[in-house]
Amino acid sequence: MRPFLLGLLLALTLPPFPFGFFAPVVLAFLLQGGFRTGFLTGLGFWGLHLIWLPQSFTALFGPLGALPFLPLVLLKALSFGLLFALTPTPLARVGGWVVLEWLTEQGAFAFPWGFLGYSLVEAPGRLLAALGGVYLLSLLVLLFAWGFQRRLWALLLPWGVLWLLPLPGAAGEERALLVQGNINPLQKVHGELEEATYLRLTEAGLEAHPEARIVVWPETAVWRIPQGTAQVLEGRPLLTGLNLLGPNRAVLYGEGEVLAHYDKTRLVPFGEWFPFREALGGVYGFFFRAFGLEGLTDRIPGEGVAPLGPYGAMICYESVFPSVARALAGEGARVLVLLTNDAWFGPSFGGRQHFALGRLRAVETGRWLLRAGNDGITASIDPLGRVVAQIPPHREGYLLAPFAFREGRTPYVRLGDWAVGLALTLFLLGLILRMRAPGWRNR
């Protein structure tokens, strides 16, 4: 029971909860114990951290919507159990935990949620993500936990500094108009996109804010660029999501034509593509009918990450992948633009959690992040991870969002996931110390 409760407490240190300061204190109690401790910790942690899944899906699809929650939590709890079983020393666990986080970003089934580094998302110390990404933040949190476990209470001072560090200003001299259509996600699936809503809001927004340099609509906003769009834009570019039958696409539109496009590369498993569909066709068919999603087909992934001119477009789920934003900045994107449809999260805190995770992409890359959500959160985030402008979610509207084009590359963009290599070294060192010869300590 104690590991389960510690797992619950650990979940409370990650977004959207405001208790990140206590993350290393809770973790200090979790650097010992084997498979059973890890599995029970995982049940508590993932059960609370992902509670938005049944909350969202039951609101949209009824009681059957809660079914995916249990197997996902069990699998994630099993990963914690294996981590604890394979890390017999605290130092090995510190390194192994970060390596496990990195592994969850890899492959077609990637689900990079629940990283410990996100406990610092509300702390000025998140600025360190520019050096080594969220993985460096996770490693720092775990190293502080290791120190607290060894009763090195003097570490409370540098840990506190991470929460009190003053940050410099970041001026955003440009302006973008971000449009929030607030369309029911099930209407989108059935092809009812209400394209006129985006034209109406854009026209009203540009009339109120003619200084806007670019207009941004969210993920899958329209089937095609609506007639009359060029006249409303009056020479401004439009970055929008297209709800095509195959790829999940973002396009840069200007001068009456599509100038460039990007197809989403990181698709949501069991949401945008359905593994083993030939073998499990009957099972999928049952759930599709139960959820009112008959005819749902797999999305086609894009061939690679590439910016649209100076704009680095990410689509929804991709904002939780540090590698996607890093690749965009490395390819020359001067501002990040996230098109998302968080209406699927319904009344749960999932949308706020997704928003918080994506904020670190701005810090890692040293870029402004413009976020246009179908029902929110629509916001502008500066390169230090601060939310400088936003509008309330769950209503239609528009936001005049400050931003700036930024050059240069942060150490994280240049060097990548070096913190994971350091974590792997600590993991191996912890194992070596565990396997030292008898009597070594006394020599």
Image (cartoon, rainbow, N blue to C red):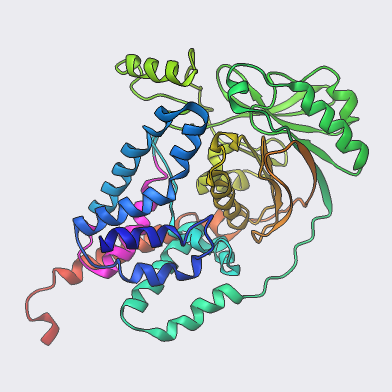
**Residue 207 seen from this side:** yes
Tally of numbered tags: 0
Residue 178 falls in image quadrant:
top right
195 versus 212 height, above or below: above
Left or right: residue 129 versus residue 66 is right
228 versus 149 height, above or below: above
Magenta segment includes 99? yes
Left or right: residue 45 versus residue 352 is left
Residue 225 is situated, as x and y percent measured from the top left of the image, at 75, 21
Left or right: residue 326 versus residue 106 is right
What residue is drawn where x is 53% and y is 78%?
Answer: 160
**Boundaries of the magenta span:** 83-106
Residue 381 is situated, as x and y percent measured from the top left of the image, at 69, 53
What residue is drawn where x is 75% and y is 22%?
Answer: 195
Magenta segment includes 58? no
Residue 266 is situated, as x and y percent measured from the top left of the image, at 50, 35
Left or right: residue 82 versus residue 60 is left
Q: Nearer the viewer, residue 330 or 29?
A: 29
What residue is drawn where x is 48% and y is 17%?
Answer: 297
